[in-house]
Image (cartoon, helix red, strand yellow):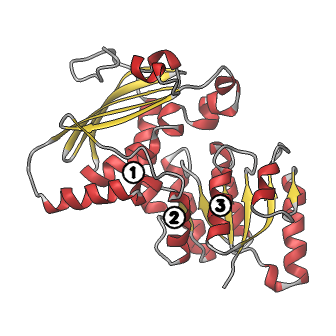
Amino acid sequence: MSKNFTLTGASGYIAPRHLKAIKETGNQLIAALDPNDSVGIIDSFFETCPFFTEFERFDRYLDKLHRQDKSHQVDYVSICSPNYLHDAHARFAMRIGADAICEKPLVLNPWNIDALQEIEQENNQKIFTVLQLRVHPAIVALKKEIEANKSKHRRQINLTYITSRGPWYLVSWKGKLEESGGLATNIGIHFFDMLMWLFGDVKHSEVHMSDPTKTGGFIELENADIKWFLSIDRNDLPQDVVEKQQRTFRSITIDDKEIEFSGGFTDLHTIIYQNVLDGKGFGLDEARPSIEVAHQIRNAKSIGIKENSHPFLK
């Protein structure tokens, strides 16, 4: 049976993947919200969907629709808004009797999860998050391989993610620490989640360098040591990547062996949505560990380049 969705943050970078997922799972988008009106992409998926630039009118419309006809009850609120609004929009979903499917990071602070868990219980609703790397075929296969091989050998991991961004990035909400959570939260959190899912909880964490455009450090997990580096500075791109006129470099090596998972990203949101609809979505408990480590990184004091720093920092 088709479900009714609404979506907040319709003009954002990630919104098309959510629109596609709603469409491909056979559901309806009955309203969309964004203060910016560059949302023509909606027509490619839901041409007649009502659109609002003001939250108050969006809220009033959904309430009026539901009161007129119970069949227009919102089943899910898809949250693609800026990171600092995720918590409020998840609460809005609970208030109107809907479940939420929230883009990463679910919230910026660990204590926000505690409050949302209380609200979930009070309303008998669920808040799900998009941990898309957990459903990537290559990562799923790697997890099965790790679980089959109960080696006591500590894995040595280098995580490198450089995604060049222009001056607009730092001017936008993404460049504001209090709104995005910084690079470790905004662009690194799903990698941290994936590595903890594979290799266990965080035992120790260090930040070796941090500025608005790049950051790096070291994390000791239960079964692995991670040297990590995140950057939006195109000057950090390896020369061979620049020569290919590519703007992004993504690499994870485990014991010097490259893990290839660069493809297959476009359909992961659809898998996440189908899992939610099937009662198998990732909830608040799954989201907590990566939010905790990202919060720890954001508030840590940089201690400078160390022997265990990522090679790009050296």
List x then y, in percent, for residue 23: 68, 67
Residue farthest to the left? Answer: 152
Left of 211 or right of it: where is 197? left
Whichever of callouts 3 and 1 sits on the residue coming sooner in the sequence is: 3
For the residues labelled 1 and 2, the Cα–Cα distance comes to: 19 Å
Residue type at numbered disc 2: Ile
List x then y, in percent, for residue 101: 60, 62
Q: Residue at x 91, y 82 (%)?
A: 68
Residue type at numbered disc 3: Lys
Snapshot quadrant of residue 61: bottom right
Whichever of callouts 2 and 3 sits on the residue coming sooner in the sequence is: 3
- Helix, strand or loop under label 3: helix
Q: Determine whether label 1 and label 2 are within 8 Å by CB.
A: no
Residue farthest to the front? Answer: 244
* Residue tagged 1: 289
Q: Determine whether label 3 and label 1 are within 8 Å by CB.
A: no
Question: Which label belongs to residue 86?
Answer: none
- Helix, strand or loop under label 2: helix
* Residue tagged 3: 20
Q: Residue at x 90, y 73 (%)?
A: 64
Viewer can see residue 206: no
* Residue tagged 2: 272
Viewer can see residue 8: yes
